[in-house]
Image (spheres, grey):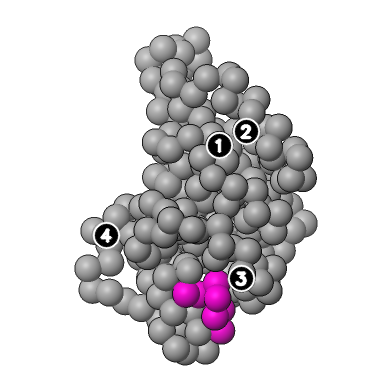
Amino acid sequence: IGFLRVNLLTALSGQAHPVVMITSTAPGEGKSSLTATLADGLGSSGQRVLIIDADLRRGTQAAVWQKFNEQGNWRPLNGSGGARTTREALLAPHTAEVLEVERNVDMLPAGPGLQDSLAVFNQADLRAALDLWRREYDVVLIDSAPLLALADGLVLGAHADAVVMVTEYGRTNVQAVRSALRRAERSALKLVGFVINKSDAREGESYGYS
C-alpha cells in the first residue's frame, strides 16, 4: 500500500486537500478494504484523513472499522446536530459528525442501506459539502458504489480531484474494465489509475528483495 500512497500523492501534487474517489467495476473487488488500508497508511504518515462511505446501498466501512470504534468516539465535523450517516450529512453538511476510527483517521458511515441512493446525491449539494469538509483534512477518501452497478459513482466522481479504480486479479474481465472506462470518460471523471487487488505475489517472482 506504500507504493499506492506515494504514487497517488505524486499524482495529486499541487492539489491542496484532495478528494479521491475509490471505486470498482463490480461488487466484491475489494475497494472498501483498500480504501481503509490506504487511509491507515496516510494516517500513519501523519496526514489527517476523512473516509466517506458513499456506497449507500451496501456500505461496509462501519464493519471494516468496527474493531476500532467500540467506544463510539463521535465528534463534530462542522457545527453540531448529529448527522452521523453519509445520507444525513450530505443533506445537512453543517451538522455532520464523524467517527474517529484511529489516530488521524475519521469516518462517516453510509448508514442503513437505501434503494434510491441516487436520489440523495441528486438532491444534495455535493460540491458545497465536499468543499466544506475537505478544509478539515489533508485527504478525503470516498468509498463509492461500483461504476457498472450504479450511476452513483459517476455523479460523485464529477466532484473528485482523482478517481482510482480497483480490479480483482483473476476475476475482473477486460470487457468490464472497458465498459467502466467508457462510463468514466463520458462523465469526464479524473481517473488517475488502477489497482490490481488480491494478486498472488508467489506468481510473480521475477523480482525479489532479500
Q: Is mark 3 on a helix, strand or loop?
A: loop
Q: What residue type is labelled 4?
A: Gln
Q: At 61% across and 69% down in the image, what residue appears?
A: 123
Q: Residue furthest bottom?
A: 80
* Mark closest to the chain's N terminus, 1 or 2: 1
* Mark closest to the chain's N terminus, 4 or 1: 4
Q: Residue 75 carries which label?
A: none
Q: In this view, does 79 lie above or below 136?
A: below
| Main secondary-structure element of the magenta-colored stretch | helix
Camera-nearest label, 2 or 4: 2
Q: Residue 124 carries which label?
A: 3
Q: Quadrant of residue 109?
A: bottom left
* Mark closest to the chain's N terminus, 4 or 3: 4
Q: In the rendered image, is residue 159 in sight?
A: yes
Q: Residue 12 at x, y = what percent?
A: 71, 51
* Mark closest to the chain's N terminus, 3 or 2: 3
The quadrant in which the C terminus is found is: top left
- In whole angstroms, how far apart are the C-alphas of marks 3 and 2? 24 Å
Q: Which amino acid does label 1 sit on?
A: Leu
Q: At 67% across and 32% down in the image, what residue appears?
A: 181
Q: Nearer the viewer, residue 202 or 19?
A: 19
Q: Is mark 1 on a helix, strand or loop?
A: loop
Q: Do the residues labelled 1 and 2 touch (CB within 8 Å)?
A: yes
Q: Give the range drawn in magenta.
A: 88-94
- In whole angstroms, how far apart are the C-alphas of marks 1 and 3? 22 Å
In the rendered image, which residue does mark 4 sit on?
66
In the rendered image, which residue does mark 1 sit on?
148
